[in-house]
Image: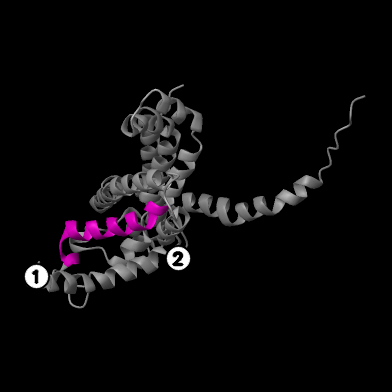
Amino acid sequence: MKTKINKSNYGYLFISPFFIGFTIFGLVPILYTLYLSFTKWDGFDDPVFLGIANYERILQDSFFYQAIGNTLIIWLMSIIPQLTIALILAMILNEKFIRGKHFFRAVYFFPHIITPVTLGVMFSLMFDWQTGSINKIIMAMGLVDDPVNWFNHPWLARMIVAGVICWQYFGYNMIVFIAGLQSIPSEVYEAAEVDGATKFQTALRITFPMLRPVFLFTLITSVIGGLQLFDAPLMLGSGPGNATRTMAMYLYETAFLNFDYSYGATIAYAIFIVIMLFSLITARAARLKD
């Protein structure tokens, strides 16, 4: 005897708050931003339709290209040491003989729960060329005679921003790698040990290949997050020659400081296209094989 399935429509009532909230606070602003990108609007007068003029402007905007370059440089400088440190710590803290592993996992994850604004302010105070603790330490050690103006050099400023991002997110990626390591069947390692494989061979032939989905996840999320850098670089300043001005900072300055909301909307969609493009490139480069 077949059981009749209750197809009551009351279920739609319970899921409707999400869709109503998303429509009001998500979909409508997205579509309105798209409309503004085809207009000229300063936030006070009525929008004036311009067609694709803003998109033609952004194709010739050297400041936007500089912001893309700065964002990519900072992302590369942060992601390489970030994932390397995270993977090494994950492999160490996943070993059974390590004592206090849960404590160290919590300690390394702690920077991730600190807000980027707080980290930006903290690092700006640490690297202040007059009163910063970093200069006082290296001067006390005799490494330099005079204080170093860290934010007056483009590459030093970028390194500091990259260091903030690396320090904030390596603990999160470490937890993701640990989850990936724990999903690998222990029988595989036992078989490799019986066959006489060394730790290096096990890592090279078993651990890394079976972590490929985790690598793909961390890379794509790092690309999406890294190309939206805003809080920490804003607190640390744009550096000499706008060396640390990211795409999101350029959007903020254009829309909310220069009151060019229509061009800011255009930059927002350009950032979306850039992020989507690099995410597709990353997924293509690290695509998984059956």
Q: Residue 168: tell me if it is visible.
A: yes
144 relative position to 257: left or right: left
Q: Residue at x 45, y 65 (%)?
A: 45
Q: Residue at x 38, y 33 (%)?
A: 208
The residue that disc 1 covers is: 142
User: Magenta: predominant secondary structure element?
Assistant: helix
Q: Residue 38: tell me if it is visible.
A: no
**Vertical arrangement, residue 8 with respect to residue 168, above or below:** above
- Residue 104 in the magenta stretch? The answer is no
Q: Which residue is drawn at 84% across and 41% down?
A: 8
The residue that disc 2 covers is: 45
Q: Label 1, secondary structure: give it.
A: loop
Quarter where residue 209 is shown: top left
Q: What residue type is labelled 2?
A: Asp
Magenta extent: 150-171
Residue 240, percent from left and from top: 18, 63
